[in-house]
Image: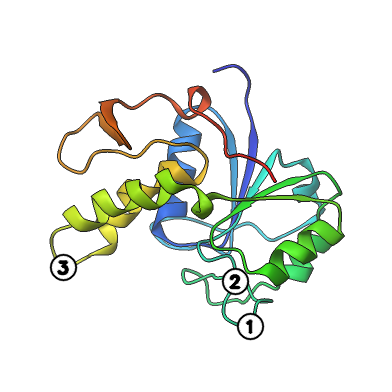
């Protein structure tokens, strides 16, 4: 790994919890807020967020009101404006399916937003594990497959352990630090 990164994951679902685990396994510092379950103890939002290399937001970023973050694994609502108040101009936020109002709020504060769900490979690769998911928990396949796409362009192949599926090719999964980072605005 080139250097340790400091990630904050705010809100989201099982994919975001799995992403946190993968990033930690690679030696990165990961903080979770508004995400609970399976032994996860969420951290409170605080000015420490200013130290984040990247703040990872949910898919979709907000609920239909375009102000409340999508936090299905947390009983407490988190407002987008309260989160942005804790960040500094120039910080990178990555979120999926960001509404125009979200993009405008982020840009008005001088921050950068990368919408990872605008990437075709994210949409296509998300379909592979989702379609292959079996059993009573459909989200299992989605969580396992989409997690790497939040920050990279890789997704685990649902039927072959240790293998990745990428649009146009299959191969071994590279570590997160070796994969492409999302395109900025």
Q: Which image quadrant is residue 184 in?
A: top right
Q: Counting other residues with Cα less than 10 Å from the Cα at mark 3, is it few (<14), some (14-19), or many (20 or more)?
A: few
Question: Which residue is located at x 17 percent, y 53 percent?
Answer: 132
Left or right relative to 97: residue 108: right
Q: Which mark is residue 185?
A: none
The location of residue 8, given as percent across then percent down, is 63, 48
Q: Earlier in the sequence, mark 3 or mark 2?
A: 2
Question: Which residue is located at x 30 percent, y 33 percent?
Answer: 168
**Which residue corresponds to mark 1?**
65
Q: Secondary structure at mark 1?
A: loop
- Work out whether residue 124 or residue 70 is closer to the camera in this orientation and state it: 124
Find the distance from the CA under tag 3 to the CA under tag 2.
Answer: 27 Å
Find the distance from the CA under tag 1 to the CA under tag 2.
Answer: 7 Å
Callout in the foreground (3, 1): 1
Please say if the residues under marks 1 and 2 sit with CB atoms less than 8 Å apart: yes
**Which residue corresponds to mark 3?**
136
- Work out whether residue 17 or residue 183 is closer to the camera in this orientation and state it: 183
**Which residue corresponds to mark 2?**
62
In this view, the residue farthest toward the bottom is 65
Q: Counting other residues with Cα less than 10 Å from the Cα at mark 2, is it few (<14), some (14-19), or many (20 or more)?
A: many
């Amino acid at each position: 790994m080139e250097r340790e990164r400091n990630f904050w994951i705010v809100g989201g679902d099982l994919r975001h919890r799995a992403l946190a685990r993968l990033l930690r396994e690679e030696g990165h510092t990961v903080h979770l807020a508004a995400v609970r379950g399976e032994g996860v103890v969420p951290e409170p939002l605080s000015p420490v967020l200013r130290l984040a290399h990247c703040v990872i937001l949910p898919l979709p970023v907000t609920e239909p009101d375009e102000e409340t973050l999508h936090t299905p694994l947390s009983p407490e609502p988190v407002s987008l404006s309260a989160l942005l108040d804790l960040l500094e101009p120039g910080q990178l936020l990555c979120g999926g399916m960001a509404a125009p109002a979200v993009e405008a709020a982020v840009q008005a504060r001088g921050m950068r937003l990368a919408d990872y769900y605008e990437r075709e490979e994210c949409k296509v690769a998300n379909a592979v594990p989702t379609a292959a998911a079996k059993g009573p928990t459909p989200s299992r396949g989605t969580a396992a497959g989409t997690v790497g796409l939040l920050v990279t362009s890789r997704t685990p192949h649902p039927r072959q352990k240790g293998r990745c599926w990428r649009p146009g090719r299959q191969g071994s999964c590279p570590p997160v630090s070796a994969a492409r980072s999302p395109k900025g605005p």
